[in-house]
Image (tube, rainbow, N blue to C red):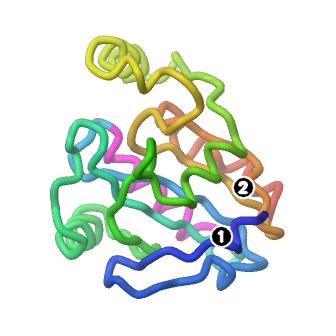
Amino acid sequence: MKIYDFTVKTNQGVEKSLGDYKGKVLIIVNTASKCGFTPQYKELQELYDKYKDKGLEILGFPCNQFGEQEPGSNEEVQTFCRRNYGVSFQIFEKGDVRGETAQPLFKYLTETKKFEGFDMNHPIAEKLNDALKANFPEYLEGDGIKWNFTKFLIDRDGNVVKRFEPTTSPSDMAAEIEKLL
C-alpha cells in the first residue's frame, strides 16, 4: 500500500485522490487554528514557497480532536489560514486523525511511522508532555497522533519516509526535504 491509494476530501468537500500527487514530495500535517503550534503554518508556507517549484506539496488536515483547538467550519479554517499566514497550500476537510474515527490516511501514516518521542529541546515540549500526562494520558500510549502539527514526509514514490512530532519546527525539516527533491 502507498499513500496514492487514498482518497480524501478537500475543504470544499470534493473527493481528491492522493494519486494526483504522484512524483511529488509531500508533507502531510494535521493542523489547528487555536493551538500553541499554530504559528507553524508560517514555516510550512515558507517551505512551500521555497520548494514548490522543485516538487514539494504540503497537505494540511484540520482536526478538532486535541483540546477542541479547531472549532471552525472548513471555510473558516481556510479563511484563517490565508488571512493570518498566507497559506496557499492545500487545506483539506476537517476530520479526526487518531482513534477509531481517524481518517484511513492517518491510520496508515501512524501504522507506517511510529511515535519516537518529542524533541524536548523545543520550548513548548515540556508543557505539551505535562498537559498530555495530566489531561490525555491515553494519547501518550501507542503510535497514534499525539497533538496538532504532527508532520509526515513522503517521497516521490509515495513512501512514508519520516514522522516529525509537533515539537519539530517545519524549518528543521528542510534538510530532509532537500534529500528527496
Q: In the rendered image, which quarter contains the N terminus? A: bottom right
Q: Is residue 48 magenta?
A: yes
The secondary structure that most of the magenta stretch takes on is helix
Residue type, label 1: Leu
Residue density around tag 2, few if under 14, some if 14–19, many if 20 or more, within 10 Å = some
Residue type at the position of mark 2: Ile
Residue named by callout 2: 177
Residue to which mark 1 is pinned? 56
Residue under the point 80% across and 69% down = 156
Q: Is residue 124 left or right of residue 16?
A: left
Q: Which residue range is magenta in the image?
A: 37-51
As drawn, the label of residue 121 is none
Q: Position of residue 129 (x, y in %)?
A: 40, 17
User: In the rendered image, which quarter contains the C terminus?
Assistant: bottom right
Residue 133 vertical placement versus 128 (above, below): above
Q: Nearer the viewer, residue 6 or 177?
A: 6
Asked if residue 132 is among those painted magenta in the image, a careful observer would answer no
Vertical relation: 36 (above or below) 123:
below
At horizontal 40% and vertical 71% (from top left) the residue drawn is 91
Q: Nearer the viewer, residue 124 or 106?
A: 106
User: Which of the marked residues, 2 or 1, is nearer the chain's N terminus?
Assistant: 1
